[in-house]
Amino acid sequence: MAVNKKLAIFDLDHTILKCNSDHSWLDYLMNKQFIKKEEYFDQNAEFQRRFKQGDVNYKDYYEFTIQYLKGKSDDYISNIRSDFMVEVIEPSINIYALRLIHKHYEKGEELLLASGTTSIIADSIAKRLEFKNVVCTKCEQKNNTFTGRIENPPSLGEGKLKNVQAWMKKNGFSDFKDTTFYSDSILDIPLLEKVEKPVAVNPDNDLYRVSQNLGWEIIDLPI
């Protein structure tokens, strides 16, 4: 059954947050010696280099970042994740982005957080931001234990579009009419091209050029 509500979709990293949440999480784990720096640092740097060049398999990258969880339950990271939320995420929340979110909320629109961030931290961040709905990169679990694998597809690029479409179908949204999407990244082009109102928020250089060429709204939020 179709719903009559408008839908406002928000990216997370560098849109609502001033940081990349997954990268910050991995750095935090290394700095707190929760994981061994020598086992992650160099490989993570190489993934980041390839990421910027557009030459990385997203699934491979995300599965690399969660290997420390393989065979463990969510309780294993509960305490350190709580500290991370206070020490890293809270100061990274852009109050001007919160105001944008609140404007849509006041209009009675449905809100959806759509992020490539892994569910390990995305669910907690969504709860802090008071998003009832979240699409993210899901970490596979069996019998409440992490397998070290990512459920397909990861929520980046075409994968984010597919996951958002699956969520919309499940929640009664038949198409992208009356849908707004806020993002900073050229990686979100597949979803930006689908929605009725794409908005570039503090866009990267590639998204800025595309937005100018296509006449999309560009917002510069103070950070």
Image (cartoon, helix red, strand yellow):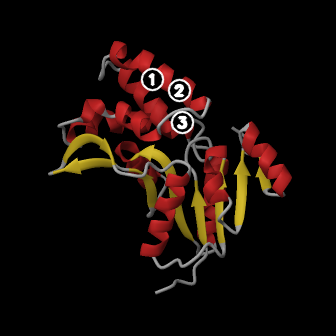
Residue 220 appears at what percent x and percent y? 77, 45
Q: Nearer the viewer, residue 19 or 223?
A: 19
Q: Is residue 126 above or below residue 77?
A: below
Which SS class for mark 2? helix
Residue 198 appears at what percent x and percent y? 71, 60
Q: Which mark is residue 48?
A: 2
State whether residue 27 appears in this view. Answer: yes
* Of pointers 1 and 3, the one earlier in the residue sequence: 3
Residue 54 appears at what percent x and percent y? 59, 34
In the current view of this chain or complex, which residue is farthest to the top?
38
**Callout 1: 10 Å neighbours few (<14), some, many (20+)?**
some
Kind of residue at badge 3: Asn
Measure how far apart labels 1 and 2 are at the Cα level: 6 Å
Residue denoted by label 1: 44
Measure how far apart labels 1 and 3 are at the Cα level: 14 Å
Q: Which mark is residue 130?
A: none
Q: Nearer the viewer, mark 1 or mark 3?
A: 1
Q: Mark 1 and 3 residues: CB-CB less than 8 Å, in contact? A: no
Corner quadrant of residue 20:
top right
Rendered residue at 81%/44% (across/down): 209
Kind of residue at badge 1: Asn
Residue 29 appears at what percent x and percent y? 36, 25
In the current view of this chain or complex, which residue is farthest to the bottom?
1
Kind of residue at badge 2: Gln
Q: Is residue 174 above or below residue 204?
A: below
Which SS class for mark 1? helix
Residue denoted by label 3: 20
